[in-house]
């Protein structure tokens, strides 16, 4: 029976993930049975109360899932929210989606309201990973499982699982891109100037990205091959509150005015993500005296940054297929709601690579079992293959990329 339920899960995921992970061989071969069992949109999912995997009290009730996203103002969360909502709804779940305008108090209220609305499970991408302990105590008291989505929620034992990308690897890919592009291993006496822009200190991911990149770059800084004219390399010095584009722009303008106005060449701007890269690129366009085009890194594949990539203004972005992050999250939610205890075997259900990691993410109350997807480098040379052929983006009439959904 368990197999049958899994078949159902997989088939649904296969149906809904027109963009994103495709299902594996086992799934296609079990397609007949599973399709038969696929609930219509109006039916409650997994309502077979005769099975040992059946969720409690669902025969006359549809599961309701609460999705709490940080803000619409940072592009990716619009995609995350809509993929999650669509995928849950395709399964017949009710899915209430909130955005909290990057205000942590508002997110606490939004989560309180979701709990009051009777959600059976919460999927939360935290604005500030440290501010949700109290509201999540309420969730725990009402047996509402919580999936910490993309960003780890800290200091609460109310979290059941964490779903994200391998955040440290995101940073490593940025650092390695810089090493390879500048050919730092064969630089000899040549030196290059670097400035660093990192993410929001309230976001647990930000230090992972920063550490991943700096662990790759530090040996070259120590050797003197990479120099940092501003002297700002510590996370606290280079962080960007709320990942805000204007804040990153201001800081880079100050750096350019203070350390580069005399014509000093900036070779590379390490930026942890696309919203900060956008500000840094604007600062360089408006205030940089040099004639070279610095290497600029990013992360996410925001539309404005992909335009800059095609225009040669941004060098790379680390792309994270959030459609797949949603697919993994939805399958995980289904398993949890079915009363199962998902483990490494969940990763067998998808073609997209995801590892089950019980060691890397400790939220202060213990290690949180994590499903980590694999990030990928996108450049002007491979964007067609990575983004267009995969169906994540399409080329608009103006020759630039637009999100496919
Ligand atoms: C996400 C990044 C994103 C950043 C700002 C991080 O938690 O992992 O993909 O760029 O938040 O939205």
Image (cartoon, grey):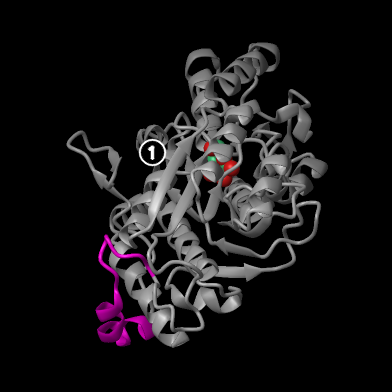
Ligand 1 in which quarter: top right
Q: Where residue 278 sits: x, y (%)? A: 49, 28
Any magenta on residue 102?
no
Between 324 and 375, the one lying in front of the other is 324
Q: Residue at x 55, y 79 (%)?
A: 345
Q: Residue at x 52, y 21 (%)?
A: 284
Q: Is label 1 within 8 A of ligand 1 (CB to nearest ligand atom)?
A: no
Between 198 and 310, the one lying in front of the other is 198
Image quadrant containing the N terminus: bottom left
248 sits left or right of 382 in the view:
right
Between 105 and 138, the one lying in front of the other is 138
Q: Is residue 56 above or below residue 315?
A: below
Q: Is residue 370 visible?
A: yes
Q: Where residue 331 sits: x, y (%)? A: 46, 67
User: Residue furthest toward the left?
Assistant: 397
The total number of labels drawn is 1
Q: Where residue 385 sits: x, y (%)? A: 33, 57
Q: Which residues are magenta?
A: 25-45
143 sits left or right of 278 in the view:
right
Circle 1 SS class: helix
Q: Is residue 236 above or below residue 27?
A: above
Q: Is residue 88 above or below residue 283?
A: below
Q: Badge 1 is on which residue?
A: 306
Quarter-wise, where is residue 358 in the image? Answer: bottom right
Between 2 and 215, the one lying in front of the other is 2
Q: Residue at x 31, y 59 (%)?
A: 90
Q: Where residue 44 sits: x, y (%)? A: 35, 65
Any magenta on residue 31?
yes
118 sits left or right of 180 in the view:
left
Quarter-wise, where is residue 336 in the image? Answer: bottom right
């Amino acid at each position: 029976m368990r197999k049958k339920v899994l078949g159902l899960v997989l088939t649904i995921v296969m149906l809904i993930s027109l963009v994103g992970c495709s299902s594996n061989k086992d799934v296609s071969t079990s397609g007949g049975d599973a399709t038969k069992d696929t609930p219509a949109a109006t039916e409650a999912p997994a309502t077979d109360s005769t099975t040992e995997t059946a969720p409690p009290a669902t025969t006359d009730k549809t599961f309701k899932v609460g999705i709490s996203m940080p803000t619409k103002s940072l592009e990716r969360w619009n995609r995350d929210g809509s993929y999650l909502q669509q995928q849950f709804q395709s399964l017949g779940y009710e899915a209430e989606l909130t955005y909290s305008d990057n205000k942590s108090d508002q997110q606490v209220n939004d989560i309180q309201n979701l709990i009051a609305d009777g959600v059976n499970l919460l999927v939360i991408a935290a604005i500030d990973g440290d501010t949700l302990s109290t509201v999540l105590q309420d969730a725990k008291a009402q047996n509402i499982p919580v999936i910490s989505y993309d960003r780890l929620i800290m200091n609460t034992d109310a979290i059941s699982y964490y779903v994200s990308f391998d955040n440290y690897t995101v940073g490593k890919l940025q650092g390695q891109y810089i090493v390879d592009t500048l050919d730092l291993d064969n630089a000899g006496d040549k030196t290059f100037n670097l400035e660093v822009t990192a993410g929001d200190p309230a976001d647990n991911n930000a230090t992972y990205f920063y550490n991943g990149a700096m662990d790759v770059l530090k040996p070259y800084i120590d050797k003197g091959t990479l120099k940092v004219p501003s002297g700002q390399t510590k996370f606290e010095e280079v962080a960007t509150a709320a990942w805000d584009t204007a804040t990153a722009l201001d800081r880079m303008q100050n750096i350019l005015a203070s350390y580069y106005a005399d014509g000093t060449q900036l070779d590379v701007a390490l930026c942890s993500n696309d919203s900060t890269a956008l500000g840094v690129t604007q600062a360089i366009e408006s205030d940089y005296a040099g004639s070279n085009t610095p290497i600029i890194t990013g992360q996410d594949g925001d539309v404005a940054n992909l335009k800059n990539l095609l225009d040669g203004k941004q060098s790379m972005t680390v792309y994270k297929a959030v459609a797949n992050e949603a697919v993994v999250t939805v399958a995980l939610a289904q398993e949890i709601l079915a009363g199962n205890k998902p483990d490494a075997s969940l990763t067998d259900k998808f073609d997209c690579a995801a590892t089950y990691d019980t060691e890397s993410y400790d939220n202060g109350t213990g290690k949180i079992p994590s499903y980590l997807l694999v990030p990928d480098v996108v450049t002007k040379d491979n964007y067609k293959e990575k983004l267009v052929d995969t169906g994540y983006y399409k080329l608009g009439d103006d020759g630039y990329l637009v999100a496919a959904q």
